[in-house]
Image (spheres, rainbow, N blue to C red):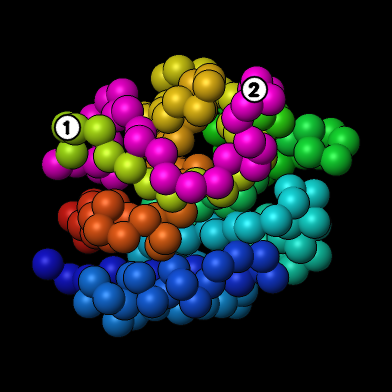
Amino acid sequence: MKKPVITIIDYGVGNLISISNAISYLGYQSINISSDFHEIINSDALILPGVGAFAPAMQNLRNLGLDHVLNEVVLEARKPILGICLGMQLMADTSEENGLNNGLGWIPGNVVKLNIPEKFVVPHVGWNNIQILKKSPLFKNDNQQLDFYFDHSYHYKCEEKYIISECNYSCSITSAIAYKNIYGVQFHPEKSQNNGLRLFRSFFNMVAQC
């Protein structure tokens, strides 16, 4: 099975080296960390990372012209993409973080602040089990509950048909979404040890088979 060419989108916001190291550990060598349009277009799979606030992240994408090239590559060319944490949230229509801000609008939904009892700390930081709700290439061989590492204060509210897993932190939180070639996870697979590595491998195996 031919291993895919992977590009981690570099737009000034993200845990780029940790993600690259995790993917390299699995034996994938063709990994770019780049904002170069040609490298993105010629990739087999994309990773959209993200840490920090929604509005500056979207502004960085726009300033670099990456919103347009990603729309072309993801929506028109249908290349598989995996959004991580804030990278997943950017796929929404809007976010209410620091005012109402428009996102990429790839998977209908809105990013809202965690509204939970005071005994639960915000941001939601640490390990949490997820419940897999439906079959997906991300969790192809996983029927049991798995734990992943989270670090966020906002979460993605969308229709049930787009949600492939959720976690409970006083309320149900969307932990993974999917629509056609677009995938996103609220947690950090690069910080989630073996479960995170398995998720990366499942995603890239799907890409290679396509």
Residue 96's tag is none
Please give left or right for residue 67 compared with residue 2 in the image.
right
| Magenta span of residues | 115-141
| Label 1 crowd (10 A; few <14 / some 14-19 / many >=20) | few
| Label 2 crowd (10 A; few <14 / some 14-19 / many >=20) | few
Query: What is the x, y in percent for residue 109?
Result: 62, 27
Residue placed most toward the observer, 106 or 56: 56
Query: What is the x, y in percent for residue 114?
Result: 66, 29
Rendered position, 128 above or below 22: above
Q: Which residue is mark 2?
A: 116
| Callout 1 amino acid | Asn
State whether residue 6 appears in this view. yes
Count the marks: how many? 2
127 in the magenta segment = yes
For image coordinates 56% across by 77% down, the residue present is 34
Residue placed most toward the observer, 41 or 167: 167
Element marked by disc 2: loop
State whether residue 39 appears in this view. no
Task: Give the residue at the far bottom of this rendering.
Answer: 29
Discs 1/2, front: 2
Query: What is the x, y in percent for residue 60?
Result: 76, 63
Residue 143's tag is 1
- Determine contact: label 1, label 2, CB under 8 Å: no
| The N terminus lies in quadrant | bottom left
| Callout 2 amino acid | Ile
